[in-house]
C-alpha cells in the first residue's frame, strides 16, 4: 500500500509511534487486565496518569503555578460561551478581534452574552491579506477582556505578535497552534485549545487560566460544567472527563518531551512551513498563497491553483499519491495543508515532490 500522509486540519494525524504504543497496551493498560477506557476516572491508576499528564503539559509550556490547567469538554466551541459566561462579571462588553473564520464564530456566540466591541483586523494590502498591528487594535477600558485567535485554522492566517495590553485580560483561542511554538503565558489571562489539532483525539479541551480570574463573579446562567471555578475545585473531574483523550494526550506530551519539547518542535515546524511556502512562491504563479509573509500560518498552509478545475484535479491526483485531506475548508475553498506537530518532514517533502510534479505536468 502507498504510504499515506494525512494533512487533515482536524481531527488531525497523530504520531505513528504513539498509535503503536496505544495498540500495544489497548486491552491491558497498566497491567490492570482492562483498557484505560474501562476504569474509573477516580481510580488510583487513572488519577496518577491524569496528574502526570497535566504536569507534563505544564512543563512543556513552562506554565507557572499561579495558572490553573483545566481539562474540559465541549471543544473550543463550548469556550466561545464559557469565556463570556465566566469572565464578563458585571460588564456588558468585551473586545473581540476578528481575524478570520474562528474568531468570527466566537463573536457570534459572544453576542448571546454581551455586546462585543468588534475590531476587524484582517485587511488587504497589495493584494495580500494581512493583520493590523496590535498597537492599532481598538480596545476599551470598559471591556471585561480581549479575545482573539492567534492562528486562524481555516484562513491560514497567523498573528505572531505577542499581546501586550497592560492590565487588560487577554483571552486566546490556541486550538491550532498550541504546543507548536513557545508562548509566554504571562501575557494571557486565559488560553484554550481543543485537542484534535495539536494535542490528541477530539473530546478534550485544555484551558489555562490565571488563578486571579477564578474568583470572578460568575454569571448565574452559566452551566456548572462550563464554570471554571467548579472545574478547578474538582480538578477537572466535576463529571466524567474524556478519559481516553486524556490518556492519549498524556502519551503525546511524553512523545513531545522525548523529541526535545516545544523549542525543538518549534524549529522543525519553521523548517516544514518554510519549505512549503518556498515551493509555492517559486512556482511562477502556478500555486498562489494570498497571505502577507508576516502573517502566514505555520500550521495551516492555504493556497490556490489557477482554476477550480485544476484544484479538483490536484486533489484527485494527490489522493492517488497518498496525500490525503488537502481540500480547503468549505468556507474558503482552495487547498489547505495542515502540518501540525505530528506531521513529519518526510510528509512535507512528499507533498512538495508531488506539487513540483503536478506543476510540471500541468503548468
Ligand atoms: C478547530 C477549531 C475550533 C473548533 O474546535 P471544536 O473543538 O470543533 O469546537 C475553534 N477554534 C479554532 C482556532 C480551531 O482551529
Image (spheres, rainbow, N blue to C red):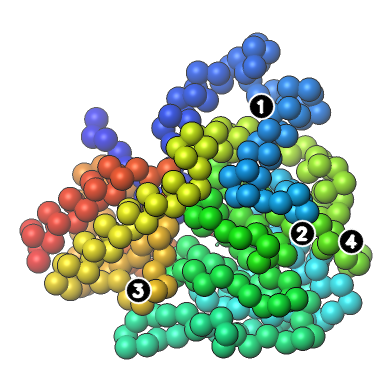
Q: Relative to 238, does residue 269 appear above or below in the rendering? A: below
Question: What residue is shown with label 2?
Answer: 210
Q: Position of residue 227 (x, y in %)?
A: 83, 56
State the separation of the CA atoms marked 2 and 3.
33 Å
Foreground label between 1 and 2? 2
Tag on residue 127?
none
Alpha-carbon span between mark 2 and mark 4:
10 Å
Distance between the alpha carbons at the discs numbered 1 and 4:
34 Å
Give me the residue at 69% from left, 29% from top: 49
Quarter of the image with the C terminus is: bottom left
**Mark in front: 1 vs 4:** 4
Identify the residue at image location x=81%, y=28%: 42
Q: Identify the residue under disc 3.
A: 293
- The residue lying at 57 percent from left, 59 percent from top is 183
Q: Residue at x 83, y 62 (%)?
A: 212
On residue 215, which mark appears? 4
Quadrant position of residue 249: top right
Q: Which residue is mark 1?
A: 37
Amino acid at each position: 500500500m502507498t504510504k499515506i500522509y494525512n494533512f487533515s486540519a482536524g481531527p488531525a494525524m497523530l504520531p505513528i509511534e504513539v498509535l503503536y504504543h496505544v495498540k500495544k497496551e489497548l486491552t491491558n493498560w497498566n497491567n490492570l487486565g482492562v483498557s484505560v477506557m474501562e476504569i474509573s476516572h477516580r481510580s488510583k491508576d487513572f488519577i496518577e496518569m491524569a496528574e502526570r499528564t497535566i504536569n507534563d503539559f505544564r512543563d512543556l509550556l513552562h506554565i507557572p503555578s499561579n495558572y490553573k490547567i483545566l481539562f474540559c469538554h465541549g471543544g473550543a466551541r463550548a469556550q466561545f460561551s464559557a469565556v463570556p459566561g465566566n469572565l464578563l462579571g458585571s460588564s456588558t462588553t468585551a473586545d473581540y478581534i476578528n481575524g478570520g473564520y474562528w474568531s468570527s464564530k466566537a463573536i457570534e456566540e459572544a453576542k448571546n452574552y454581551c455586546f462585543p466591541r468588534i475590531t476587524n483586523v484582517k485587511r488587504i494590502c497589495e493584494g495580500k491579506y494581512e493583520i493590523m498591528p496590535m498597537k492599532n487594535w481598538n480596545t476599551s477600558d470598559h471591556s471585561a477582556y480581549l479575545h482573539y485567535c492567534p492562528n486562524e485554522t481555516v484562513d491560514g492566517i497567523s498573528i505572531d505578535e505577542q499581546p501586550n495590553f497592560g492590565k487588560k485580560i487577554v483571552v486566546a483561542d490556541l486550538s491550532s497552534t498550541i504546543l507548536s511554538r513557545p508562548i509566554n503565558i504571562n501575557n494571557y489571562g486565559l488560553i484554550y485549545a481543543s485537542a484534535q489539532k495539536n494535542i490528541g483525539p477530539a473530546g478534550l479541551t485544555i484551558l489555562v487560566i490565571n488563578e486571579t480570574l477564578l474568583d470572578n463573579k460568575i454569571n448565574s446562567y452559566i452551566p456548572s460544567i462550563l464554570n471554571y471555578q467548579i472545574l478547578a475545585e474538582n480538578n477537572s473531574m466535576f463529571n466524567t472527563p474524556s478519559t481516553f483523550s486524556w490518556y492519549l494526550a498524556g502519551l503525546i506530551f511524553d512523545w513531545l518531551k522525548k523529541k526535545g519539547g516545544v523549542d525543538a518542535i518549534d524549529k522543525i515546524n519553521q523548517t516544514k512551513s518554510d519549505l512549503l511556502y518556498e515551493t509555492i512562491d517559486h512556482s511562477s504563479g502556478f500555486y498562489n498563497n494570498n497571505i502577507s509573509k508576516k502573517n502566514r500560518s505555520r500550521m495551516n498552509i492555504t493556497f490556490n491553483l489557477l482554476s477550480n478545475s485544476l484544484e479538483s484535479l490536484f486533489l484527485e491526483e494527490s489522493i492517488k499519491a497518498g496525500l490525503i485531506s488537502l481540500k480547503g475548508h468549505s468556507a474558503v475553498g482552495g487547498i489547505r495543508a495542515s502540518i501540525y506537530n505530528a506531521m513529519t518532514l518526510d510528509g512535507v517533502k512528499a507533498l512538495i515532490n508531488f506539487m513540483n510534479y503536478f506543476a510540471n505536468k500541468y503548468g
